[in-house]
Image: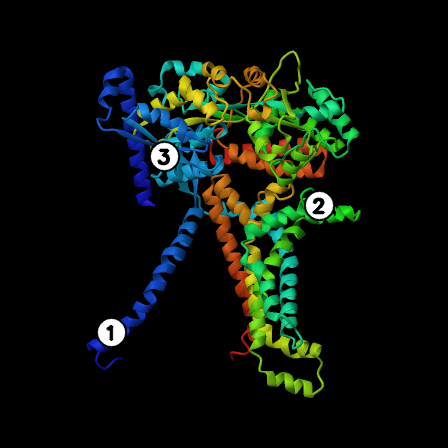
Amino acid sequence: MRGHRGFRRAALAAGAVLLLAAGCSGNDASPAADAGRPAENVELTFWTWAPNMDKVVAGWNAKHPEIQVTVNKQDGGDPAVTKLLTAIKAGSGAPDLMQAEYQKIPTLVSADALADISQHLDKGVAGHFPETVWNSVTLGSDAVYGVPQDSGPMQFYYRADIFKQLGLTVPTTWEEYAQTAKKLHAADPKKYLGTFSANDPGWFVGLAQQAGASWWGIDGESWSVSVDDEATLKVADYWGGLVESGVIDNKPMYTPEWNAALNNGTQVGWLSAVWAPGVLEGNAAATKGKWQMAPMPQWDKSQPATGNWGGSATSVTSQSKHPAEAAKFIEWLNTSPEAVDALAKVSGIYPADQPGQSAALSAPPAFFANQTDFYQVAADTAKTARSFTFGPNVNVAYSAYTDQFGKAAESRSRAAFTAAVRAMQKTTLDNLKSSGFSVK
Amino acid sequence: MSTSPTAPSTRRRTVAPYAFLAPAVLLFGAFLALPIGYAVYLSLRTVQVRGLGLGKGSREEVWAGLSNYSKAITDPDFAASVLRVAAYGVLVVPAMLGLALLFALLLDSPRARATKFSRLAIFLPYAVPAVISSLLWGFLYLPSVSPLYFVFGKLGWDVPSVLGSGSVIYAVANIAVWGGVGFNMVVIYTALKAIPTEIYEAAKLDGCSEVSIAWRIKVPVVLPSLIMTFVFSLIATLQVFAEPVTLRPLTNTISSTWTPLMKVYRDAFTRDDLYSAAATSVVLAVATFVLSFGFLRLVQNRAFSQEN
């Protein structure tokens, strides 16, 4: 359509002008930035699903009358992202600020939904975060597409009371995990040490990440896809073996059945992330004080590692008219001691900010009141999180995961698990190629 | 044609029908024709990405010709979902219409008691939205939380979960049958009520039993209603979406492309590819159109025999 193309051209031209402007302000930064500061007050909207975020933001609003932030609560990650992408396509309706899960950032950047705020941020911001986390907001480039808010390093959660009762020891390697699963299931055929959940791609990514996988990569001007690398195949084969032998369950997580199993002690362990206490509290309230947390079982004990499940950054959208002010706010939100403290205590999230973390997380979560070193263990494991690059079609890979691993888990066949990984690789790679991305 | 074309009264008369039609035409245009036209337009376009696809100007909407259509038709997932829905239809439609006809005949029989209550009870599931009924059935299907499985366990029966790979299609069909019987029963029952009672008296005088009255008089008379409910059911079958989507998180056996509409949804909202989704939905719409009108043509004489 003619009008459509005309609009696109105009947008491109506008983009070029912006780039030129950015180039100018880079040369003599401060005068240009000052000249661009609006005289009147700025109002920013913020889409987020973190609980009680409005209370955290109130601290900023009280002190910054010239930059007022309004929190607009969204439900969950995926619907908010779909809504944002729709607003970007429509050309209006997007907020200034958006909570974005790490795995969605390449997709959002690829859809031109997020602004590069590198020039608006303090140079020291990067130093607040572990390198692996910071990489997820830069995608390995000079651009910065958000400031990390929380991260989800993975640990092993288990029912200490049942372990004690059956004389089981906490597994430190995956080999021990398999043996423990076998012993437990032999002692009581109704009990499982865990379940292989085919509807949680993020969970499997965390496990593959721990083994050293990174499914996408940027190689010069091309993407690479390596879903079927050795590490992922090793993890799939391992879980396929456990499911095939029947010592690990094949039911999805987050179902009424799974909740019941957590409550009645038939699911005895859960490989989860640092936010697990909140989920357990909500889904298995009756088991308070019976759980313990330990580092993940390891593939190689001499090189302890973990993966991430979840975590998000706060980003400035490409439709925001005040990117500089928005960037200033998210820098405060995610790196200032007072905001990080509020994030941890009021919002109940595990802040990605390293300097503020230990002060903010002095006491264990209420559900784990008996484990005083909870956040010490969490911080230690967080340091061992491996790097993982997400690509622009994470959505395609994730939906291939649920389909392929659904079939594999249902068939309870070890071979089907590795076949599922290969099918995911093919789907993900074919989709990148057919969309026109340059792929190696 | 007209003798006095300039007379104001006749002009008003020629304007009036258009004025009456206008709201319907406007609504049809704005909420049906335009969106359909836009979907067809989208189905002929696609996004072309360049290089890494990051940043401004790296993606462009381009003309795609019929490539979205050829992709949709040759996609093995789509073919599988069509076959699955065909099997689902073979299960649902006869069971639903058979039960609807049976209940209508039973309620219409002279010795039936508490017909008002029974009619309401059978109709009630239709009033429950598909998502809610699927959630309720989902609980009944999950062995460890289901009261049904609790009873089976007490009786010592070892019943496998109906959400397993072989039986999940029955589990979904069951929800649709419960939801649809009541509505179809009311349509058929209303047709039965239109039969003059003298016919039954005459039949009884001829020595006809209740069963043969039902079989030889009632069923042939309600045949047009049955044909209509069949067409409705056919269309509903092709559009099955809410039930499997609601059950999907509970099991490994329902894929993201389990039915054709689920594939459309996945392409549009999970893969962010509106263009393929538009092409698949156009294919689906044409198929629905051809099937329902083809069937109506086939049974034209019987369906509309009473009107002729």
Give the SS element for disc 3.
loop
Q: Which quadrant is the N terminus of chain A positioned in?
A: top left
What residue is shown with label 2? B161
What is the CA distance from the residue labelled 1 to the residue labelled 3?
52 Å
Q: Are marks 1 and 3 on the same chain?
A: no
Quadrant of residue B212 in the image?
A: bottom right
* Percent x, y of residue A325: 31, 25
Q: Earlier in the sequence, mark 2 or mark 1?
A: 1
Q: Residues within 10 Å of mark 3 (few under 14, many from 20)?
A: many
Residue at position x 22%, y 28% in the image: A40
Percent x, y of residue A278: 55, 29
Give the labeled residue for mark 1: B12
Q: Secondary structure at mark 2?
A: loop
Residues under numbered marks 2 and 3 in contact, where contact means CB atoms less than 8 Å apart: no
* Residue A264, above or below B165: above
The chain ID associated with circle 1 is B
- Asked where in the image residue A302 lies, by quadrant, the reply is top right
Examine the rendering and report whether any part of residue B302 can be seen.
Answer: no
Residue drawn at x 29%, y 36% as measured from the top left: A10
Q: Can you tell which mark lies on residue A95?
A: 3
Name the amino acid, label 1.
Answer: Arg
Nearer to me, B16 or B46: B16
Asked if A150 appears above or below A77 in the picture, the reply is above
Name the amino acid type tagged 3: Pro
